[in-house]
Image: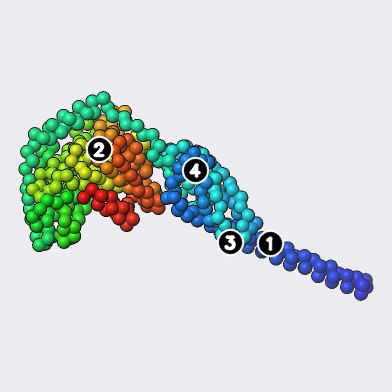
Amino acid sequence: MRQVSPEITINSNRLRFFILSILCLLTLSIASCSRDCAVSDEVSVEVPVEHDWLFFGKGPFKLAADVTGNEFRTIIELSIKRDLDLMDTTAAPILEKSIKLRTKPGESVRTMLPLGKLAPGFYQIKINDNKPFNIGVNPEQIQSPADTPVDFDEFWETTISELNEVPLEVKWTLVPEHSSAVRECYRVEIPSFGGATMGGIIFIPTAEGRYPVMMGFMGYGANVYYEDPDYHADRIDYLVSVRDQGIFKGNQDGWIDRGLASKEDFYYRGAFCDIVRSVEFAAGLPKADTTRIFGCGDSQGGAFTWISAALTDRMRAITPGVPFLSDYPDYARIVNWPMQEVFRHADAEGIPREQLMEMLRYFDVKNFASRITCPAYMAFGLQDPTCPPHTNFAGYNNVKSEKHYFCAPRCGHGIWEISEWLQTRDAFFSKYQ
């Protein structure tokens, strides 16, 4: 049997120890790398609201961001898409950029993300896997010119003339459970264009005198609500219900897809007449101060607010919020509802798309905007997925009278939930009372 020398045994042991040491070091190195990679995968980016996420001037623009990352690999993936491209699945972002940053693990660093030069409009920003959000650039320079048909004025003059042939007869019903010694509450029903009925809920002070009238125009399919009769004791509050909505709604839904075949039969021809009739009714109230009739409303109510001033000369000041029914062509490029629903019904009825869009021009809020002469304060939610800011400004930018706007940068469609806007709105109205 072969003998192994002690020297060789010792050297073999040393070799085994050396190899094990190397393996341990490699294991520690891999573990360390894994921990570092885990940190880099957890990069956090917070974008503080600065200047309401609205940018002005010529640019190039930069967006502030607070980044918490890793010292070995912190990469920010930034993409920008025009709001007008949101429904186009083939449209590429106008900017895609990888931004490398030097950071220490766990430390937050303020950096300025380059957005470049952007034309007036609204844009969707996507940072890494975070939820995308919108910014605005020079919103008052957005071009959404009116596309009124040549017989637009004639059509509406004829329509209002037909409305005026309907007697303004009012059915009053006292609502005792919502009345008090300060103000009485009534449900009113009024005949309108085409034989339909409109009306609403009205609170009238019991004391003698002349009072300002606050007209509230309701959102699409919104439910009726009642004011505290002791609140706003020094004014008349009138919550307007157009045909088949508000106090007349019942279990039905869907109005924008009614009567799509012609401008004569479209639902909003009658609904806009109901707004005109509501203003006439308010101006005829014995206790109304006709020099102080105000209008407010959100969404569909925002559109009705614009219409109240465009089709009558009675309004002292108005505050449309997140207005609906404006800029139909661009609407369809930004959001799915309601235009896709309109298209679906039109297709089912065999109405060509060009014919449909031509008809809608007679009811596009932006085409009424130049008629408005009273002061206006518009509110919009920068993140609104239902009545997006671009469509809000389509009408706003065509208004020639005194106007202001309020931006709620993190708000979606629920502008009525923003207390700062409600305070701003009340302060605006107080200037004219």
- The disc labelled 1 sits on which kind of residue? Ile
The colour style of the image is rainbow
Q: Quadrant of residue 121?
A: top left
User: Tag 2's secondary structure?
Assistant: loop
Give percent across and percent down for residue 313.
19, 38
Which structural element holds mark 3?
loop
Q: CA distance from mark 2 to mark 1?
A: 72 Å
Q: Secondary structure at mark 4?
A: strand
Whichever of labels 4 and 2 marks the residue nearer the N terminus, that label is 4
Residue 56 lies, in percent from the top left, at 45, 42
**184 lies left or right of 297:** left
Circle 3 is placed at which residue position? 107
- For the N terminus, give its image quadrant: bottom right
**Label 4 vs label 1, nearer the camera:** 4
In the image, what residue occupies the spot 23% across and 37% down? Answer: 310
Mark 1, mark 3: which one is toward the viewer?
A: 3
SS state under label 1: helix
Residue beneath disc 2: 373
Q: Residue at x 84, y 68 (%)?
A: 15
**Residue 179 in picture, x, y percent from top left:** 11, 60
Give the CA distance from mark 1 to mark 3: 24 Å
Amino acid type assigned to the residue bearing label 3 in the image: Glu
What kind of residue is marked 2? Answer: Thr
**Cα–Cα gap, marks 2 and 3:** 54 Å
Q: Is residue 51 left or right of residue 378?
A: right
Residue 30 numbered tag: 1
